[in-house]
Structure formats: C-alpha cells, structure tokens
Amino acid sequence: SGSTGPGRHARWVVGSFDHRVVPPALLDLVRACQREADVHLGGGAALSGAHLHHRLTRDLDLFLHDRSAHRHLVRRLPELASSVGVGAIVVRDGGDFVRFSLGEGFELDLIHDAVPDLGPPERVDGVVVESLADLRANKLTCLLSRAEPRDLVDLLFLERAGFDVLVDLQPALAKDAGIDPAVLAWLLSSFPVRPLPEMLEPLDESVLLAFRDGLAARMRRAAGGS
C-alpha cells in the first residue's frame, strides 16, 4: 500500500526494534557480539525486527566478512550469551556457517560472508543492522537457494512498503551471479505459499498466492517473455 516512486525510498526512516520479533535479551546478546567483533544482524530478524514489523522469526543471522573474526566469535559466543543470561549450544559447525541453539525455540547463525555489502550497515537501538539495500537484495537470492514461504511474505511486505522487487534485481546480481528473472519466474510459478510464518500483520494465503503469480508474470516480462 505505498507508492513505489523514488521519493518513497528517500523518506524511509528506520525506527526501533520490535521486541515481539527479537526479545530484549537476544538484542543484548547481539550487542555483546558486536562489542567483540565487526558483525551485523541480517535476515528476517533485521528485516522484520527493525523495518517491517510484519512477522515473527526464531532465527538470528549474524554476518562477518573476516574469517578469523568469525571463528573467534564462534569460540566466544557461549560465554557472551551467558553474560546476558542466555544459553548457547553449538548444534552445527560447518566452518563458515555455525548454528547455536539459544533455547525457547530460538537459533543463532554465525555466518562468514565473503561477499561485500552493497551499503554500510545501519544502527538501530544500538544494534548494527544490515542495510535495507542488502536485506532486499539478499531476500531475492533466497528464492534461488530455498523454497520458504516466509521469503515470499517478506517480498510482499517490502512491496507494500514501497520497494519494487524488480528494482532489486541488479543489486542482487552482486550477491549471486545466478540471479536471472527467467529463472525466478520459473521458480515462482510453483513457489509454496504455505505454511505461512507467524504473522504480526494479517495476511491471507490467497493474497500471497495472487502476489506470487503477479510477481512471476512481472519476472517473465523482465526476462523478455510474454
């Protein structure tokens, strides 16, 4: 429901974190990590927590560009979590991708990401958050790597906030060379719309389905198809 004109983007103002999305204790953990290393919060926790306030998530994604800093933080994270009253147990260590269980259904992923950011991170409530440009581009790349309805939900609410998904195709190429509107159109044609994530803003499955089909058609046109 907002204009997609260029002025809409210029007026976008980051507010504060929605504690329904990221509880205060987990924000404290992120801040503790950021005092220890150059790391920023991305993914759904950043997009919904700091910007759209539209859905819940149980995942915290922390990104580091320096591999040695990443491994240092992997070693330090259980102690940092304990310092803010949170438990953290490693459940998967894939080298550049390490997942911790934080209890109460929450998980934290520490990710070494060699791809440079499109823009400088922003600070929201003392938390360093991935730029909105990066969040939008990364959300498109998610369509290639997984088939999760939450990614389609995020794109829908980004468009409602005034951000045209097709405008983000070119920036997304810097993240993933496999980004191609024809491929995305094909993936979207059968992309799942259920189960919906836990929503904070109401959303009917039929609305998401219509958005998916419309976006697939726009991607086909962008690729030069009919």
Image (cartoon, rainbow, N blue to C red):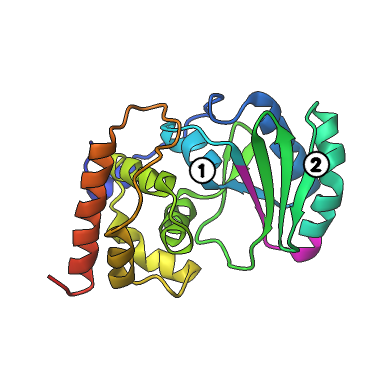
67 w.r.t. 22: above or below? below
**Rendered location of residue 140, percent (x, y):** 40, 58
Q: Which mark is residue 89?
A: 2
Q: Is residue 210 left or right of residue 15?
A: left
Corner quadrant of residue 172: bottom left
Is residue 35 among what the camera can see? no
Residue 82 placed where, x, y %? 84, 32
Q: Which quadrant, please, contains the N terminus?
A: top left
Amino acid identity at mark 2: Ile
Residue, x 34% and y 45% (percent of image)? Answer: 193
Crowd rating for badge 2 (residues with CA inside 10 Å; few <14, some 14–19, many 20+)? some
Q: Position of residue 207 (x, y in %)?
A: 23, 38
| Residue for badge 1 | 44
> Going by the image, does 179 lie left or right of 135?
left
Q: Which residues are magenta?
A: 60-69
Q: Choose top left, top right, bottom left or bottom right for residue 139.
A: bottom left
Q: Is residue 4 above or below residue 53?
A: below
218 on left or right of 69: left
Q: How many marks?
A: 2
**Quarter occupied by residue 45:** top right
Rounded to the nearest angstrom, the CA distance separating label 1 from label 2 is: 21 Å
Q: Is residue 76 magenta?
A: no
Residue at the image point whose x is 21% and y is 42% from the top: 3
Query: Is the C terminus in the top left, top right, bottom left or bottom right quadrant?
Result: bottom left
Task: Identify the secondary structure beneath mark 2.
Answer: strand
- The three-letter amino acid code for the residue at tag 1 is Gly
Residue drawn at (36%, 48%) of the image: 152
Which of 26 and 12 lies nearest the eye of the viewer?
26
Residue 216: percent from left, percent from top? 24, 59
Q: Is 144 above or below relative to 1?
A: below
Name which of mark 1 and mark 2 comes first in the sequence.
Answer: 1
Between marks 1 and 2 in the image, the one whose residue lies nearer the viewer: 2
